[in-house]
Image (cartoon, grey):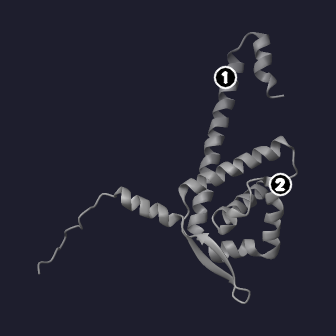
Amino acid sequence: MAENKGKAPRKKPISVKQLEKQAKKLNEYSTFTIDPEQNLVIKYYEKFDDIKIQQLLEEAYQNLTYVQQNELDFFTSDDQFLQYIYFLIAVRFTHLENEVTHDIESQIPIMRNMISTGLFNVIFEDVLDGNEVMKVIDRLEKMQEAVNKILNLEDEHRKKVIENVQNPEILNFATKEDE
């Protein structure tokens, strides 16, 4: 038998069938036993689907907007928003996704109950893969960076307009939004 010293294995292009297999695996639950005496389990996704991550972030943004528009007393700090993101991770990547609506006003009591009972900690300490959770947090940070860049560009543009405008009526209109 001849040896293959220094030869790299043959490279195979990925097929549509392999993609389907990988995607199907993303949507299969694994099971973690929370309490063996009561036979309580939580079903969860081992790997996070990128589409579900995007949907989670869209849900968070929509609910943040709703809270701000309706002047609700929630998300008063960045920590609360981050805790809410973790709640969405705990829900949307477990079987709880089927029981929890996308309505923030019904989600808040559920989140508080999960934290109070310790289920929140169990999910993040024992169930979900930390690397998968960080994929969501990293995506959130990238979105935040993009938003900050857009806001900075808008601010710079507004300053240039204000510097270059001579007409007082237009200048008043350009600065009106800042007040």
Is residue 22 toward the left or the right of residue 55 in the image? left
Q: Can you give x and y, in whole percent of width and height, for residue 14 in the image?
A: 34, 58
Q: Circle 2 — which element?
A: helix
The residue lying toward the viewer, choosing from 10 and 158, is 10
Residue 130 visible in image: yes
Instruction: Answer with the quarter of the image where residue 120 lies.
Output: bottom right
The dot on residue 105 is 2
Real-space CA distance between mark 1 and mark 2, rounded to the nearest whole angstrom: 42 Å
Where 12 falls versus 62 (above or below)?
below
- Outermost residue, left side: 1
Where 28 falls versus 39 (above or below)?
above
* Number of residues whose C-alpha sits closer than 10 Å to that of mark 1, classed few (under 14), some (14–19) or many (20 or more): few
Residue at 83% from the left image edge and 72% from the top image edge? 116
Instruction: Answer with the quarter of the image where residue 46 lies.
Output: bottom right
Image quadrant holding the N terminus, namely: bottom left
Residue 128 visible in image: no
Q: Can you give x and y, in whole percent of width and height, for residue 16 in the image?
A: 37, 56
Kind of residue at badge 1: Lys
User: Given contact means CB atoms under 8 Å apart, are the residues at marks 1 and 2 in contact?
Assistant: no
Image quadrant holding the C terminus, namely: top right
Q: Which residue is mark 1?
A: 160
